[in-house]
Amino acid sequence: MAAGAADKVSVLLPTYNERENLPLVVWLLVRSFETSGYSFEIIVIDDGSPDGTQEVAEQLVKIYGSDKILLRPRAKKLGLGTAYIHGMKHATGNFIVIMDADLSHHPKFIAEFIRKQKEGNFDIVSGTRYKGNGGVYGWDLKRKLISRGANFITQVLLRPGASDLTGSFRLYRKEVLQKLMEKCVSKGYVFQMEMIVRARQLGYTIGEVPISFVDRVYGESKLGGNEIVSFLKGLLTLFATT
Amino acid sequence: MTKLGQWLWGLALLGSAWAALALGPLGPRVPPPCRQVLLPLPIYLLVAFGCYSLATVGYRLATFNDCEEAAAELQEHIGAARADLRQRGLRF
Ligand SMILES: Nc1nc2c(ncn2[C@@H]2O[C@H](COP(=O)(O)OP(=O)(O)OP(=O)(O)O)[C@@H](O)[C@H]2O)c(=O)[nH]1
Ligand SMILES: [Mg+2]
C-alpha cells in the first residue's frame, strides 16, 4: 500500500478519571501528528468519569476543533473492551491506534508504528516492552518479576508469535480490528492477549516496535485486586480453547 | 487443534516412546547402560526445563530496561504541554 496522503489514523482514547492526563496526552498526540504529517482524529471515550474528564475534553474540542477531537462518551463505566468497540464505530481512519490515556504510552511511538507497518505491510503493529530498547519505568522488582514470569508462561503455553501480549499500545488496520473485536470475548489484560492469539489464528501478520512504558504519574490505577488470578484464569481458558 | 491438545498429543507421543523403551516391550533389547539412563530421563528433563525457566526469567528480570531517560523526557514534555495549553486557554 502506498504511504502518505490516503492514510488516516484514528486514535481511540478510553478514559476513566483522567482529567489530569487527557489534555497532556492530546497535546502530545497533536504535536506528534503535526510532526509526522499524517492525518488523524482522536476519539475520546469517557465513561462518565466523576472527576470531570469530560469537561476538560470539551475544552480540548474548543481548542483543537471537533474534526480532530471527537467525544463519544457513555453514561457509566462499562469497561474497556466495549469502550474500544464503541469508539471504533465512529472511527473514519484506515488505521486505528489503541492506547491508554494515562501517559504510560507516549504518542511519539505512533510514527514508528506506522513506519513499521509500511515496512512489512503488517496487519497489526504492537508496542513491546520486552524487546530491544523497550522497557518500563517506575516498576519495583516484584512487579517486574510478575510481568516477566507471566510473560514467560504465556510464551510457553500459547506460542503467540509476539513478545508483549498484555500491552495495549498497538496499531491495527481498521478492518482487522473490527474482525478481531467480533471474535474476542475476554476482559481486562486477557483481552489484549486474546487479540494477538486470535490474530495469529486468522493469519494476520504482526510487527513489533520496542516502547518505553512509563508508569502513570497522575491518577489512580483502576485494575487492582485479583489481577493475577484473573490473568491466570484467562490464560488457561485461551490455552484450552484456542 | 487447541494448544492444550497439542501439548497432550506431544506428551503422549514422547511418553509412550519412553515407556516402550524403558519399561515395555522394547526394554530387553536396549543395552543395560542405556536403560539406566532412560529410566530417570523424564525427571531429568523436567528438572532441566525448570532450570531453564528460572534462568530465563531471572536473566530477563535482571536485564529489564529501566527507562530513566524516557521518564525524564516525559516530564519535560508534560511541562511544555501544560505551558502551551494554558496559553491556549485551557483551565486544568
Ligand atoms: N472508557 C473507559 N476507560 C477506562 C475504563 N477503565 C479504564 N479505562 C482507561 O483505560 C486506560 C487504561 O487503564 P489503566 O487504569 O491505566 O489500567 P492499567 O494501565 O492496566 O493500570 P495502571 O496504569 O497501573 O493504572 C486508561 O486510559 C483508563 O482511563 C472504563 O471502564 N471505561
Ligand atoms: Mg495504565
Image: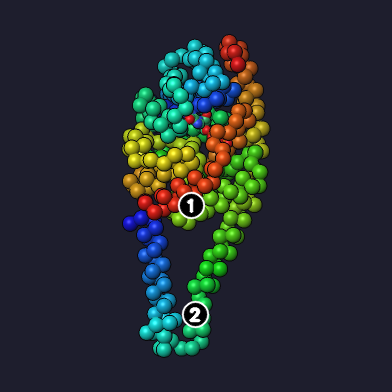
Question: Looking at numbered disc 2 in the image, what kind of residue is underneath it?
Answer: Leu
Please tell me which residue is depicted at 41% across the width and 78% down the height of the picture. Answer: B19
Q: Chain of mark 1?
A: A
Question: Looking at numbered disc 1 in the image, what kind of residue is underneath it?
Answer: Thr
Please tell me which residue is depicted at 52% across the width and 47% down the height of the picture. Answer: A229
Crowd class of label 2 (few under 14; some 14 to 19; many from 20; radius 10 Å): some
Tell me residue B38's x, y (percent): 48, 80
Taking depth in this image into account, of A154 and A206 the one nearest to the observer is A154
Marks 1 & 2 on one chain: no
State whether residue A85 is above or below residue A187.
Answer: above
State whether residue A68 is above or below residue A183.
Answer: above
Please tell me which residue is depicted at 66% across the width and 47% down the height of the picture. Answer: A141
Tell me residue A110's x, y (percent): 49, 32
| B78 sits to left or right of A49 | right
Taking depth in this image into account, of B43 and A226 the one nearest to the observer is A226
| A52 sits to left or right of B75 | left
Tell me whether the residue at label 1 lies in contact with that at label 2, contact meaning CB atoms closer than 8 angstroms: no
Q: Chain of mark 2?
A: B
Mark 1 lies on a secondary structure that is helix
**The C terminus of chain B, quarter of image:** top right
Is residue A31 visible in the rendered image? The answer is no
Q: Which mark is residue B39?
A: 2
**Colour pattern of the rendering:** rainbow
Mark 2 lies on a secondary structure that is loop
Is residue A77 visible in the rendered image? The answer is yes
Q: CA distance from mark 1 to mark 2?
A: 31 Å
Tell me residue A234's x, y (percent): 45, 47
Please tell me which residue is depicted at 59% across the width and 22% down the height of the picture. Answer: A20
**The N terminus of chain B, quarter of image:** bottom left
Residue under pointer 1: A154
Residue A133, quarter of the rendered image: top right
